Image (spheres, helix red, strand yellow):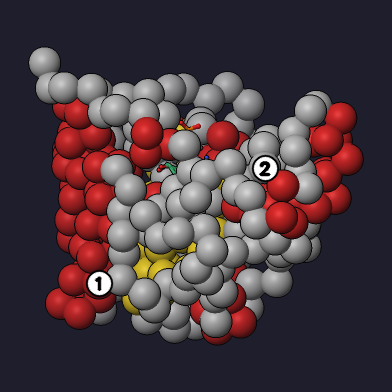
Amino acid sequence: MINPEADRVLITGAAGAIGTALRVGLRSHWRHLRLTDVRPLQDLAGNEEMVVADIADRAAVEGMMRDVRAVVHLAGVVGTYTLEDLFRVNARGLFDVLEAARLAAVERIVFASSNHAFGCYPITEKVSPDLPPRPDSLYGVFKAWGETMLRHYYDRYAIRSVSLRIGTFRPQPIDQRSLATWISPADIAHLVDVSLRHPDPGCLVVNGYSRNTRLKTIDPNWSTLGYRPNDDAEDFRDMLRAKGIDVDAPDRDEWEWPEHGGAFPRTPERPVR
Ligand SMILES: NC(=O)c1ccc[n+]([C@@H]2O[C@H](COP(=O)([O-])OP(=O)(O)OC[C@H]3O[C@@H](n4cnc5c(N)ncnc54)[C@H](O)[C@@H]3O)[C@@H](O)[C@H]2O)c1
């Protein structure tokens, strides 16, 4: 059990979009937050400390793990990246975080996985985390590999973890697909909060979505974890319609993207230099 009053939580990738939402959502009740990113942060609260480091710097990662009870691992390359960075940050970086966590006797890891770990399922299929991964890209493959690594660290070293298959994290939904896949800033903070507080999640994989009317997934692990999302992308339907997005097409079973992964996997990964 991780204690919000007493235990130190390390958040990697803390300067990013999700890291910023977590800081806002967690800092009032998690008393000891250690933040790390390759980019510095200026606006630290009284209960936040910052370590500026590259996640692939093993010595730095071992140093930042001191006195840490739980890790929220967000650091990673997203969107536009080189294959080289994907291997160095998302694969090697994850390995170094897990090894450093094990050596420091960390008890809980919350990992930012992605819906791209199951992106090849057709959008018409109600996917649950119990189904085998079907990654839609090398990015998704490394997310599924991260989940498998956490399984290994649970079976071998009893480190409990929750892998979050995050959908579309934005302040608001942005397109037709995100009416199904959106997760709001408040809901992701709540999801991470319950993932840290749960007394024994074992090695859990959960979908990271808001309670969208158009959800195309089912997830019994939400109730296991005590995740009760509050926001619904449908509330932004008129805003999207005003932008010219055909929000009614899915009601006619016409999805912009036929797979859970959306347009993302169509972007080719760049060759290693
Ligand atoms: N935003 C989404 O919709 C979404 C969806 C699914 C999964 N995720 C995952 O959630 C995590 C956070 O995503 P985000 O949207 O906040 O992305 P982001 O790009 O805003 O944040 C990622 C952070 O990681 C940091 N970082 C990158 N390389 C690093 C390195 N070598 N060393 C240290 N820090 C490094 C960046 O500086 C950045 O602050 C990522 O792992 C991403 O794959 C995000």
Please state, as top left, top right, bottom left or bottom right, where the C terminus lies in the image.
Answer: top left
Image quarter for residue 12? Answer: top left
Image quarter for residue 21? Answer: top right
User: Eyeballing the image, is 157 above or below 191?
Assistant: below
Q: Secondary structure at mark 2?
A: loop
Q: What residue is shown at x 13% (from left), y 22% (from top)?
A: 272
- Work out whether mark 1 precedes mark 2 in sequence or the reverse, and give the earlier one: 1
Q: Residues within 10 Å of mark 1 (few under 14, many from 20)?
A: many
Q: Amino acid at mark 1?
A: Arg
Whether residue 9 is visible? no
Q: Amino acid at mark 2?
A: Gln
Q: Which residue is denoted by mark 1 in the rendering?
A: 151
Q: Nearer the viewer, residue 141 or 205?
A: 141
Q: Quadrant of ligand 1?
A: top left
Q: How many marks?
A: 2
Q: Nearer the viewer, residue 53 or 167?
A: 167
Q: Could you give the CA–CA distance between mark 1 and mark 2, rounded to whole angstroms?
A: 34 Å
Whether residue 55 is visible? yes
Q: Which residue is denoted by mark 2 in the rendering?
A: 176
Q: Position of residue 158 (x, y in %)?
A: 25, 78
Q: Position of residue 3 (x, y in %)?
A: 54, 71
Q: Is residue 158 left or right of residue 40?
A: left
